[in-house]
Amino acid sequence: METQGAHISFSHVSVEFDDGADALTACKDVSFTVEPGQAIALIGPSGCGKSTTLRMASGLLEPSEGTVLVNDEPVVRPRQATALIPQDLGLFPWKTVLQNAALGLTIRKVAKREAQERACQALEQVGLQGFERSYPKELSGGMRQRLALARALAMDADLLLMDEPLSAIDALLRESLQDALLDLWLQRGHTQMLVTHSIEEAVYLGQRILVFSERPGTVVADIANPDMGNPEWRDSMAFAEKCLEIRAVLAGGAR
Amino acid sequence: MKPPLLRKIGGYVFAVVFIFAGWWITAVLVNSPALPTPADAVEVLVANADQLVPYFFTSAYRVIVSLVIGTVLAVPIAHVCARSRTLDTLFAPVLYLLYPIPKVVLLPILLVLFGLADAPKIVLISLTVFFQVLVAVRDAVRAIPESAVVAIRSLGGSRFDEYRHVAVPATMPAVFTSLRIGVGTAIAVLFIAEAMAGSTGLGYYIMQSWSMVNYPRMFAGIIAMALLGVVLYALFDIVERRLTRWR
Ligand SMILES: Nc1ncnc2c1ncn2[C@@H]1O[C@H](COP(=O)(O)OP(=O)(O)OP(=O)(O)O)[C@@H](O)[C@H]1O
Ligand SMILES: [Mg+2]
């Protein structure tokens, strides 16, 4: 299925959390755009507002200042065509694997049959066929992350937002899931925003890499990464150099 | 059939034998007409079946209707209260003051208001069940992780979807746990209500036997009432297990 990607635009976005006595500025003057079909990676120190930025893009949170546009419309609530994989995956322990995978469709009132068919396809794409009737507690950490991915895929979204989706996975499996993410993005052409702590992951999966500063988070660098998309390039010298470049920017931003 | 099932049945057979043996030994040791042996009681149970069976169903009807009414009223109120901070701050103290009061003290008033038939008994048991389910479900709703609600919202879910996909399935086990635990109290209240007023039901039968000084007959009634409790308990236990397969 070919999807036309969504266009994202953040302009001068700030977020303040007002916890009674002390107000906390999570993001300050964040501006960037993502072209349709682009895949960007967001990286930055812990607590700098990456998840907050993603939540705004998904429509779960409104900025205190500035505007967030998806396809030129302000996002005031979750869009039907946006799929978010939250940091904690957002799986429902009381639902089976198949029900979890189909949930996005169920909520969109897709007919049950079709929802199940599409969920099964998505489960197959992430290699979870045969586990439809299991419950999430019966899956390994990596399988759970793949289930969360399957749910997002089944929705056939034009915008895929992921908050450290591979953080709980061991290195080898992580690489194969990164390959899976890359394949899916190449196949489908949706717009993609990936929050990650891993420089390698950002360089492997981001056409552009946005580097955030310490809190209050703002974009300190927007690094083009044109070689991304080629599965072999993980082992190349250029890849290693790109990683070093990002590391240098991150170290600079922390100063 | 499957060995676990066989083992389970074996366990219950052993339990019944154990309880009856204990009763028998106690009866022999106490050696009083007030404590007949199980053999005497079972003999009367069989002989009086034509009277006991309808009473059993009358009592069962009263408890089951009350369990349904109490639950149907408590669950939505618990959800609404737990989800709304204003309502909860308003009603939580009321709830905590009323919950520990034994509702059975209201029986005399209910008898005046509703007469001697089924109504006062059903009202009283429903009230007891209502509070038990209300407290359990309210706590269960409050224990729902915020992340589950956020996940539903991020999928574009409405308020209704939050109930359907999160609040209800997440709290269903608590409903049946509270019902299972509440069966004992419900039957105790049933006994008192039937013993104090009316002329039907197992509670009435037990008290009538007591005033007739017919202890074997009384114990036949007690066995029937115990059976009612066990059946309901087992029923809720099975449903609860089904609903908590995901845990
Ligand atoms: N709902 C909230 N209420 C109050 N403060 C919040 C809330 N959500 C986030 N914050 C604060 O905003 C800041 C940014 O949080 P955010 O989760 O966006 O960071 P992050 O970059 O995703 O960090 P990490 O890499 O550790 O996941 C943090 O200091 C956090 O404590
Ligand atoms: Mg985060």
Image (cartoon, rainbow, N blue to C red):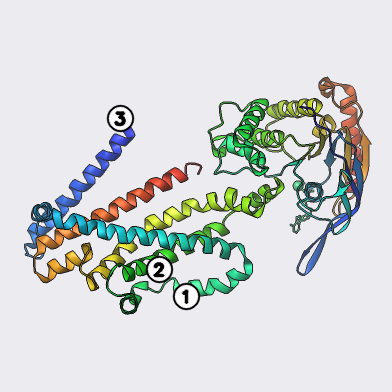
Circle 1 packing at 10 Å, graded few (<14), some (14-19), many (20+), is few
Quadrant location, the N terminus of chain B? top left
Mark sitting earlier along the chain (3/2): 3
Marks 3 and 2 sit apart, C-alpha to C-alpha, by 42 Å
**Does residue B13 appear left or right of residue A179 in this picture?**
left
Residue A190: image x %, image y %?
Answer: 81, 33
**Residue at image location 11% in from the left, 56% down from the top:** B48
Residue B201 position, x and y percent, is 22, 63
Dividing the picture into quadrants, the one containing residue A129 is top right
Report the residue marked by disc 1. B97
Q: Nearer the viewer, residue B117 or B81?
A: B117
In this view, the mark in front (2 or 1): 2
Numbered tag placed on residue B1 in the rendering: 3
At label 3, counting other C-alpha atoms closer than 10 Å, the crowd grade (few under 14, some 14-19, many 20 or more) is few
Closer to the camera in the image, A80 or B35: A80
Counting from the top left corner in percent of width and height, residue A253 is at: 91, 46
Q: Of helix, strand and loop, which one carries label 3?
A: loop
Disc 2 target residue: B127
Residue drawn at point x = 84 percent, y = 56 percent: A63
Label 3 close to label 1 by CB (< 8 Å): no
Residue at (81, 61) in percent of width and height: A24
> Is B96 situated left or right of B86 in this image?
left
Type of the residue with mark 1: Leu
Frontmost of labels 3 and 2 is 2
Question: Which mark is first along the chain, 1 or 3?
Answer: 3
Chain letter of the residue beneath label 2 in the structure image: B
Which of the labelled discs sits on residue B136, or is there none? none
Distance from the alpha carbon under mark 3 to that under mark 1: 50 Å
The response on whether ligand 2 sits within 8 Å of label 3 is: no
Taking the spot 60% from the left edge, 36% from the top edge, the residue there is A112
